[in-house]
Amino acid sequence: MNVMSSVMRGARWLLHADLPLLCTAQRPAPLLTCPSRSSASKQVRGQMKQERNPKVKLKVDRQEVEIRQGMTVAALALAMDKDSDHVLEALLNTSVDLDSLEPDSVLEDRWIKEAVTRSGMKFRWAKLSTSRERPKQDAQRRPPADPSLLVGRPPVVTIMGHVDHGKTTLLDSLRKSQIVSTEAGGITQHIGAFLVQLPTGEKITFLDTPGHAAFSSMRARGANATDIVVLVVAADDGVMNQTVESIQHAKRANVPVIVVVNKCDKLQADPQRVKQELLAHDVVCEEFGGDVQAIHVSALKGDNLLALAEATVALAEVLELKADPSGPVEGLVIESRMDKGKGPVTTAIVQRGTLKRGCILVAGKCWAKVRFLFDENGRTVPGAGPSAAVEVVGWKDLPSAGETILEVESEQRAREVVEWRSHEEEQVKLREEQNAIELKQKLHLEEYHRERERLTHLNWRQRRTALYRANKSVFSMRPSEKTQSDQLSLPLIIKGDVDGSVETLLNILESYDAQQQCQLEVVHFGIGDVSENDVNMADTFGGSIYGFNVAASRAMQQLAARRGVPLRLHNVIYKLIDELKDELSSKLPPLVSRNVVGEARVLAMFDVTVGKKKVPVAGCRVQKGQLDRRLKFRLIRGRETIWEGSLAALKHHKDEVQMVKVGMECGLSADDDVDFRAGDIIECFEELDKPQILIEELDFDRKSIKMMTRNVMFWTNQTL
């Protein structure tokens, strides 16, 4: 027994001292190096305690990564201070196709956040930076020139007035050409700029503006680029809508007016009445004590045109028109268009300096190195001084009509100006979008607080139930989940030959005031002939193509026919407008009208047994017209309609008939259970469909003042 106890104690001692003994077995060492029994047991107990109570690790702050929408793999890796392979490894075991990802591949927002989170980092969205301001690199007008450098210049005269009052014919007579014969429909539809040299040697630059109500913006542009306005009024028609509008344009631009009473050779001509009507619009002629010259002419016969020229030259001398012909060029884009052989072409009025070949110009967000200059007859000219109207060829893009032209020193400077203007426009759009987002967030937060305030009296379980019911009904009615809209719409592709035509068409569409009946949406607009892209876009959106003074090749016409795309090309503005009205009206569902065919009075009621069922039958006498079983009927009692529907049977005596005429008696039964009474009136009627016309049409006379005010506010700053 004592031996067993000794053996057990030795085994326990070996168990606690096994490692040191193994060490000594491999490498002999003094016995004193092995730990004692008590120290070994303490060491084991310490290790076990450490395993039961591990030490708490210190919290390490995670790296914060600034992310933004549309980040590429390389951009995200740079923001995380990692390489691109790290981003790909972070997206392992996700639905992302890693084989297709390249360093320049754009990641979705959810994968950007997933990659950052899996990397053990935090993310925050980048905000729109407003602190960094880009240095201003815009081109500016020069300060006023030294009076000693100014020289006389020809006046710029704009001919304005109502449509078909003889404006173009007057200009045609002045320069002895046939302009009016080339105008589609006999009306001017573009701004024409011409230099006319009078027999006395004086030169005058004339601008001929359209007179149709749709071209309000063009008249505004012409009035604000001119020195003198010649207001043409027909002696037989008098003051009309566009006459009043032209007067308002001239007043807003602070331009003197010369009244030309045209068509004085007609028998119905009454020049005195015209001048009296002008008094109501604050245009006081000289014979009534005012300062406005009034010239009686006949543009068709050429009568008294010399007096008009003398009056224009005299007024120009009073105005003492001068300009600086030296230094960088300043001007104004009157019209712009795309030419197949020349590319982007602008008609410009030079206001300051001398425009020559090789000049570097900037207009809006476009720039040009002038390659050619053409006059109104298509001849090349070496240069153009103040008040000259020329066509400029060499634009990289097509500037908008009304833009200010400024000359810069180099192409690099022109690119800087265009880039800065584009940047400024982009920043304005970003600020507008940011303001809209913040406003929407504010409204959502207010709505959230209002919803919560109504639930404050409930406990948490009742509040959760109420929110679930409310959200369930809201989600079921989300408009984003609607696959098809019930709203009628007409998408449009607008093409024009020049920028002014497109601007005019857009102004016309802006005056459309019946969106509640049929929405009018401009999908795309541009300058030039109809292209394949236009047809494809119209086919995608299910819209129509409207072109003004543009052509469509045979291939484009065949493509549009195969795709079923309406292609509507016009040379006269009011014909285009009329067809647009007709198409809008055709989109509306037809109106159903009821035409009463016959009328009968119920004389008596009786029941007829059909099988096991009793059917009520009304005995009637036809008083008006005839009753046709194939049509619809309604039962009128007093002034109230009791029933409306179809007949189950119509009999004359015992015979089934299709029709009963006036004066005949009949028995009829309805499809439904109807309570007929003696004295009731039964009407037979037919439903007819007729096309619906828009309540609010494109009314230009009514909208012209509003359109003119908007355009003049923009053009008033463009002074000569």
Image: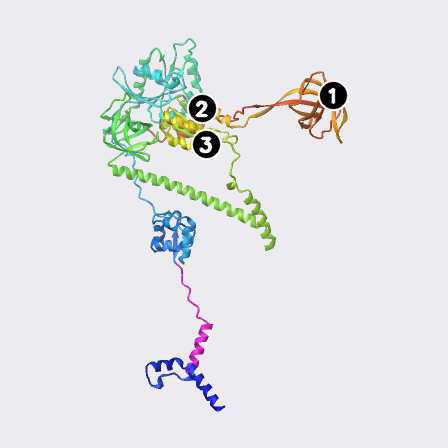
Image point 30% across, 36% down: which residue?
140
Q: Are marks 2 and 3 in contact (CB under 8 Å)?
A: no
- Residue density around tag 2, few if under 14, some if 14–19, many if 20 or more, within 10 Å: some
Task: Tell me, yes or no, whether the highlighted magenta stretch contains residue 50.
Answer: yes
Give the quadrant of the C terminus. top left
Q: Are marks 3 and 1 in contact (CB under 8 Å)?
A: no
The label nearer to you, 1 versus 2, is 1
Q: Secondary structure at mark 3?
A: loop
Q: CA distance from mark 2 to mark 3?
A: 20 Å
Task: Tell me, yes or no, whether the highlighted magenta stretch contains residue 249.
Answer: no
Q: CA distance from mark 3 to mark 1?
A: 57 Å
- Residue density around tag 1, few if under 14, some if 14–19, many if 20 or more, within 10 Å: few
In the rendered structure, which amino acid carries the disc numbered 2?
Ile
Q: Nearer the viewer, residue 109 or 251?
A: 109
User: Which residue is disc 2 drawn over?
Assistant: 577
Q: Is residue 96 left or right of residue 345?
A: right
Say whether disc 3 or disc 1 marks the residue closer to the N-terminus. 3
User: Which residue is disc 1 drawn over?
Assistant: 654
In the rendered structure, which amino acid carries the disc numbered 1?
Lys
Which percent across, then down, holds residue 28?
32, 83
Image point 69% across, 30% down: which residue?
672
In the rendered structure, which amino acid carries the disc numbered 3?
Gly
Which percent across, then down, holds residue 629?
66, 22
Image point 42% across, 11% down: which residue?
269
The label nearer to you, 3 versus 1, is 1
Q: Secondary structure at mark 2?
A: helix
Q: Which residues are magenta?
A: 39-62
Say whether disc 2 or disc 3 marks the residue closer to the N-terminus. 3
Mark carried by residue 576 = none
Which percent across, then down, holds residue 35?
39, 83
In this view, which residue lies farthest toward the top?
267
Mark carried by residue 542 = 3
